[in-house]
Image (tube, coloured by chain):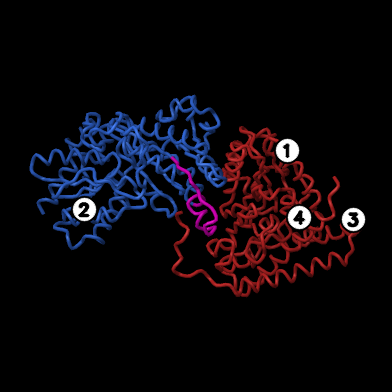
Amino acid sequence: MEIARDTLLGMYRRMVRIRQFELAASDLFKRGQVKGAIHTYIGQEASGVGVCMALKKDDLIAGTHRSHGHNIAKGAEPKKMFAEILGKETGYCKGRGGSMHIAAFETGSLGALAVVGAGIPIAVGAAMGFKMQGQKRVAVPFIGDAGSNTGNWHEGLNMASIWKLPVVFVLENNHYGVSTNIRYSTNIDDLSIRAQSYGIPGVRVDGFDVIAVYEAACEAVEKARRGEGPILLVTESYRFDGHYSGEPEVYRSREEVQEYRKNDPIPRFKNYLIDKKKVSSAELATIDKEVKKEIAEAIQFAQESRQPDPSTATDYIYT
Amino acid sequence: MGKIEKDSVSLGKISVSMPPDLIKQVEDGTPATELSYQEAIREALREEMVRDERVFLIGEDIGKHGGAFGVTRTLFDQFGPERVRNTPISENTIAGAATGAALVGMRPVAEIMFVDFSGLAMDQICNQAAKLRFMTGGQCKIPWVIRMAQGGGAGKSTAAQHSQSLEVWYAHIPGLKVVLPSTPYDAKGLMKAAIRDDNPVIFLEHKMLYSFRGLVPDEDYALPLSKCDIKREGKDVTVITSGYMVWHAMMAAKELANEGIDVEVVDVCTVSPLDEQTIGNSAKKTGRVVLVAEACRSYGPAGEWGMVVMERAFEYLHSPIVRVTGRHSPIPFADSIENGVWPGTVDVVKAIKKVMQY
C-alpha cells in the first residue's frame, strides 16, 4: 500500500503531538495544576494514530478514560484539551468533563467514557443509526484489553455482528487493566480469536508500528463502510507509564518496561521515514519543534483561561 | 400498614372492578375513543413512528411477539424489522445502543421488559446516557425513551424479580426524566411528550394498569413532562400518589365522600423532575397530607414527597403527614403473603381517617 508523503508526515506530527501533550500533562499533574487523575497514552501513539488516520472526519470514535491520544489522533486541538484538563471554560467540555471525559464532537469524537467497555454499546448504536439513515459512516470504539472481559464486549460484538453494523472494534492490548495483566485475566494469548465466536474477522497487528496499524485499519474501515459488517482489530502495544501518572507500578518490573520501551513507536517511525521514505531528519526536527511550540502555546492558553462561573455548576444537565 | 390484615387481602380483587369512570379526563363532546392503557401506549408509539421517521423501537421480543405485555403488537407488521428491532437478551447494550443512535440523530424507544431487569443496564442508563450531555459541556443531547413494566398487584404472583416498583432508582439520577402514568389518557400523552423530549426519559408502565380502559382523545396531544396531575379536587385532605396507587386513592376518596370527607388526589405522573409546586399548593389548601406509594418504604418516593410538603407547606399543616407504602420486603409469591406487602384502598382510607382525626 502506497501511503502519501503528507499522510506519513501527518501521522508523525500527531504521534509527536500526543507524546508532547502527555508529557506536559503529566508534568502539570505532578506540579498540582491538573486535579483528579491523568491516564497517559505514552507508548500507544501508533495505535490511535494509525486507526484515526484511516477514518474520515465524520466517522465517529468512542474513547475510554485513557483517550487524550484518541482525541488528538482524531484531530482535537491541544489548546482546548489542555483547557479541559485544567478545568477551564474554554475546554472542549467547558471544564465539566476533565481528563477522563474529553469529547470533541466537532472532530467526530463522541466522548471518552470512563467506565471500562462502556463505549462499545454506544458505538454499536451509532453504527445502527448510520445504517438506518443510509449513511456510509463507520463507528470505532477504542477498548483496552481489560475491556474485552466485560459484558459490554460480548453484548456489543454480538449485536453488531447479527445486524452487520459498520463498526471497527479496536482492542488496544496494552497488557494491563490497572494492575492486572491480561495473561492472568484471560486464558488466551491472541485476543483477536475472540472475533470467531461472533463470526466476524479478527485481525492482530503490531501496535508499535503505525504503518501496520494504518494499513490494517484502512482495510477494516473500508470493509465496514461497504456494509460487510463489523471487524475486530487488535493492536498489540504497551503502556509505558503506570495506570495513572505517578502510580507506583508494583505489579511489573522495571526491566519489563525497559524492554518494551526499546520498541518506542516514535523513534521507530522516525527511522522508517528517514531510511525508507527519504524524509530528512531536519524536516522531522522541524515538526518536533513546531509541536513543542504548539504545546507551549496551548498550555499558556489553558492557564490564562477562566474556570467556569460557580453559578453555572448545574448547567447542561437537561436540554 | 405493617400487619397483614384481613380486609387488605381482598384489595387486589378490587382492582379488576375499578370503575373506569372513577377518573374523567376528556371533556364531553371531545371526539375520543375508549382504549386500554396498553393500547394507548401502542397508539402513541404508532403515531410518533408515522410522524417522525427517526423514531424506532428496540428491545427483546418486541417483534412479531409484540413484547412481554403485547404493547408493540402489530407494529412489527406495520413498520418492519428495522424500526421494530428485536434484540438478543442484552439489556445493557439495548440501552447503550439507544444512546449511540440518539447521538447520531435517531429517536429510539427501547423496551426493557421489566424494570427488575434494568439493573443490567444501569451503567448505560445512569453513568452514560444521563451524564453525557453534562460531562461534554452540552455538546450533545440524548433523545431516547426506555420503557419498562413495573409494579405488581395481588394475584399476579410474579414474585421477587418481576414485581418491583423502582422509580426512585432513576429519579435519583440527575439527567434522567422519569414518568409513571396511571391512566390511558396520561399514558398516551406522556409517551408522546417523552418521545418528543430531547432528554433521556424512563417510561414506567404499571403492569396492573395495562388492561385498564379509559377515553383517549382522537386528536394529537402531548402532556407536559414536568407536572403532577390533580385527579380529583377536594378540600379536606391531600393524597399524593402515583401509578396503580392512584386508583386505590380514588377508590378511597369515593368511599370517604359518603362520610363527608372531601379528598384531593395528586397524581405524580412525572416522578422526575418533581412538580413541587402542585404538591405544595395542594398541601397548603387542605392542610392534611397522606402519601401513598407502592415502592418500598425506606428511601422511597413517599419520603421525598413528604419532605417537599414540609419545605413548602409546613405552617399550613393541621396534622402530621402519614405515609402508606409497600413494606421493606421483596415481593413474595404466595397470594396469602403477597397481599401483605402492598398497600391498598383500605390502608389509604385508614390513613386519611387518621389525619382527619388528629
Mark earlier in primary sequence (4, 1): 4
Mark earlier in primary sequence (4, 3): 4
Question: Residue drawn 77% across and 62% down?
Answer: A258
| Span colored in magenta | B127-146
B141 sits to left or right of A287: left
Dot 1: chain letter: A
Q: Is residue B128 magenta?
A: yes
* Residue tagged 3: A277
Mark earlier in primary sequence (1, 3): 1
Q: Please, what secondary structure does the residue beneath circle 1 have?
A: helix
Front-lying residue, B346 or A181: B346
| Shade of chain A as shown in the rendered figure | red
Question: Residue drawn 86% across and 65% down?
Answer: A283
Residue A223's tag is 1
Give the image location of residue B30, x and y in percent. Answer: 27, 34
Q: In the rendered structure, are the residues bearing label 4 and label 1 in contact, judged by CB atoms less than 8 Å apart? A: no
